[in-house]
Amino acid sequence: MRGRVLAAVCVLFAAHVVPAEAQVRWRDLVVTMGGSMERYTGNFSAVTVPVVDSTDHATASVAEVGVRGSLLLLEQPAYTLTLDLDGGVRQAAATGFRLRDYAPREWVGTGALRVRRALGSAASLTASLSAQTRSVHDRPPMPLFLQPGFSTFGGTVGVSTRSYDGVSFDVEAAGETADYRALEFLPQLDLLDRRSAGVEAGANWSNSRGWIRFFAGLRWSEYRHQPSFDPSDPFRRDRSVRAGLTWTHRGALFVQVGLEGVLNRSNSNRPEYDALSASALVTAPLPGDVTLNVYALLTGKSYVHETDFARLVPGEEADNASVAFVQLARAVASNLDAALRLGWTRAETDIADAYYQRFGLSLRMHYRPF
């Protein structure tokens, strides 16, 4: 329900900023339907206050429906205005817990209004306003980890130059506010509310065979519900440095390799960490009009200070996860394709140094109405 409300709000907002004579049309629209079987395992020895119904392993069968698309609201030689929408629902039936079985349902919705404008012939300006909401019913305990419900609102402004002898540059500033919906029996979720701002700059070298991108960024976050235990600096403030590079090759094989490092420092000792990740993506055509996708993201993370119990911001566990999957995709009609995926994930829960693993086999159908 929340995702549909968000989509309706974005459409109504766009209706007030788009001229009546503009020709609104879908740039892309995809309906996804699918199901999966998933198994979760984990070692939660770091959790000093465990949930009574926690377990070492759980299984889940999942069905999902989603819709995503890009609506072109205005297109002129000098600028374009688009509305990106993405929403859906996942219903799971989970077993393996001690007290009872769970049936978590996740509603998610995202809307982003984006404008791109040419700044003469030398550069272009991009800006966006976005909102995201998430609602979870019957959220299960460990190890079947699901993020709690939240709402975020954010915006970005960026400038990118045209290519000069194969080299281009870009810079982007972003801000966001996040509100986590605390449940009556889980009031500590209010501790995760945050405001953040950041800036990132990059350089790109490109030719007919691919490109190389270097980037670096700074991000500042503050959590006004988390005390720092310092009277002169009473609430938690984080600052992180992120840098990396991506190499992409285009040809019969599409290959992309990346390396990224993160240093997170804070006026509170427990969330300080260093992380390094390496990623690789290979896409190759196979006989029978089948496409093979192989992806791996391996991440190592270490905390600067040892703590027995530290809550993370939901999302940090995904930012510092290790993920791998193999996918076979094939078109079964002119506007319908199917994808079979075998995947693995290892990531932190919202408890620092408590990791879970997920193994999953899924089948998804992607339908494009036009």
Image (spheres, rainbow, N blue to C red):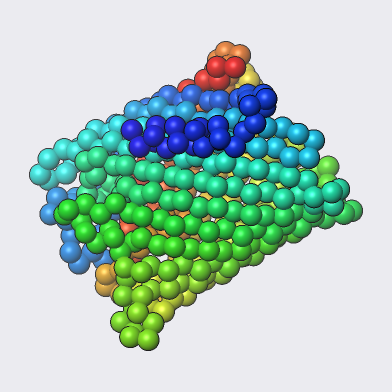
**Is residue 10 something that shows in the picture?**
yes
Q: Viewer-proximal residue, 347 or 238? A: 238
Is residue 219 placed above or below 360 in the rendered structure? Answer: below
Measuring from the top left, give residue 68's x and y in whole percent.
Answer: 51, 31
Image quadrant containing the C terminus = top right
Determine which quarter of the picture holds residue 277: bottom right
The N terminus is located in which quarter? top left
Residue located 24% across and 33% down the image: 93
Horizontal side of 309 relative to 109 (left or right) equals: left
Residue 296 placement, left or right of 347: right
Please, is residue 193 above or below residue 7 in the view?
below
Q: Look at 54% across and 66% down and name the residue there.
A: 219
Q: Of 63 and 313, which appears nearest the observer?
A: 313
Q: Which quadrant holds residue 82? A: top right
Front residue (pair 115, 328) = 115
Residue 236 x, y percent position in the rendering = 38, 74
State the residue at coordinates (65%, 37%). 81
Determine which quarter of the picture holds residue 312. Answer: bottom left
| Left/right of residue 48 with respect to residue 26 in the rendered view | left
Percent x, y of residue 98: 12, 45
